[in-house]
Image (cartoon, helix red, strand yellow):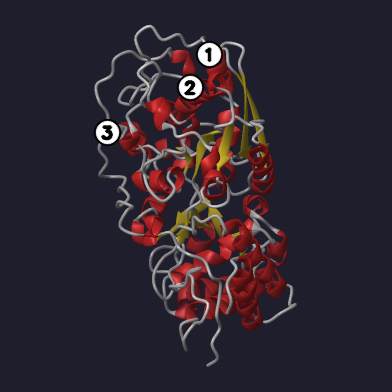
Amino acid sequence: MKNYPFIAIVIVSLLVGGAINSFFLYNDIKIKDKPNKKMATPLFFEKEVKGLPEIQEPEGFAWRQFDGVTINMITENTPPSIALAANIWRFEAVTGIKINMELDNLGTVIEKTGLDMNAAAAKYQIIYADPYQILPQYDKGFVDLHKFNDDPKLPHVPGGLGDFIQNQLNVVSYMGNKDKLLTLPYDASTMLLAYRKDVFEKYKDSFMEEHGYDWTPGPNLSWDQYYEIGKWINEKAANGTITEVKYGIGHQAKRGDSLMNDFSNILAANGGDYVEMSNIEQGKSDAMLQSVRFYRKLIKIAAPESISWDWTQLADAFANGDLAMAPEWHDFSALFEDKTKSNVSGKVGWAILPKGKKGYANSFGGTGLAINKYASEKEQKAAWLFLIWATAPQTQYMLLQSTTGGSTPTRYSVYALPDIQKDLQDGTPDSKKLPNLLPMKAAFEAWKDENTYVRPKIPQWQQANMLIFTELSKMLLNKQTPEETVRSIARKSNEALGKRE
């Protein structure tokens, strides 16, 4: 077999090695908090929740000392940001600080952040610092948040940094070491497998009769079986046996970040990675090449529109009832359960992504909020108050229940609440009240170290990322073979990084 050198990227071991502690299990959580002193006005929240760490104000602290200050925040238009935007008035009412929240697609957020940082203009005082394409590029342009968290004259992180899920804190808030706290964890988007419970229950026996195994999505499902199941559903839908869906599977294979993430789930599950390796010895490229070949085969049986779908369009297609399965960010659970926007409410199950030849790999896409160091001191302090509020356990509990998007918390303490523990039990009346919690059993499994995939956090990743999805897209459009795709990614990436093959 020929050698197929592929992408040359240095993995930051901090992200995937021993520096990341084991994720918690939902049924074994302890609240990490110290006794509270004085709680900020409850107007910050929809209601007070006993048992959560509270925002504590220093003696004599005036919440309206920055009255009239305007803070511009740029963020991706994710379900968590949509829910937060709907509640910003609460923060503004207490502090007098005006928050202009600009929501856009991730590519635009990256572009505008780059322009702002390069000009040192501080047009945006608060930045949604994607840990792969923004944080590594502009970490020197963000304030070390220890500056404010250690200031006795300002409110501190309620519950302390130890209340944040530690894996997520390490990924989104630090670069290389923990000397500087660059963001506060804001969301925890993770790719899981969304599937139609009604379809899998109704046709389970028929499939088992033909193929001899239980096809229910979960830890026992492999990517090869996922392909087989998708193809079987396609055939049955085409001949009219299955009427609930049009296609077995759908993917977010549009040229862009969505394509890179979608493919990476398979690459990492097969033991591959975007590792520095400019001259690969015989056989060392198997995982990359085999993954590329399999991905092309997979997309050929996916809904034809998959090559034009990103995560949002894929979610819309699933909510419309077109698909039986789709690897999707778990934030979309609220959309799927919204009867005014979805045809599949009450019919959706969530599972860990299928396993590959080496194990499981669920892409983690969580992000933190950063403060622009080029902003004025007054603006920075006003922005800090917003970060404290936006990431507070009470706020996360409020957004968890949002009907206009919502997110799953990045805090141990929220998951430890008795009512949340009860609501985590799928199928109970209480669980239907909080659709954002429906994916969480699968998410907790995906958040274990051995099951999480974290992309490289290096300054060159943004450029390498573009090369990856560009070459994969060419292959999906039948402009090049998998072998040519792997070679092209390697050659162009080496050139971008100033290396030679």
Mark whose residue sits in front, 2 or 3? 2
Q: Is residue 404 visible?
A: no
Closer to us: 386 or 25: 386
Per the model, the C-alpha gap separating discs 1 and 2 is 9 Å
Q: Residue, x 38% and y 6% (percent of image)?
A: 60
Q: Which residue is mark 2?
A: 385
Please state if 407 lies on the left or on the right of 422 as rendered. Answer: right
Residue 258: image tag? none
Q: Which residue is mark 3?
A: 32
Q: Residue, x 63% and y 60% (percent of image)?
A: 463
Residue 70 location (% of width, % of height): 63, 19
Q: Earlier in the sequence, mark 1 or mark 2?
A: 1
Q: Earlier in the sequence, mark 1 or mark 3?
A: 3
Residues at marks 1 and 2 touching, judged by CB atoms closer than 8 Å? yes
Judged from this view, the residue extending furthest toward the top is 60
Residue 15 lies in quadrant: bottom left
Amino acid type for the residue under numbered disc 2: Leu
**Callout 2 environment at 10 Å: few (<14), some (14 to 19), or many (20+)?**
many
Residue 95: image tag? 1
Q: Secondary structure at mark 1?
A: helix
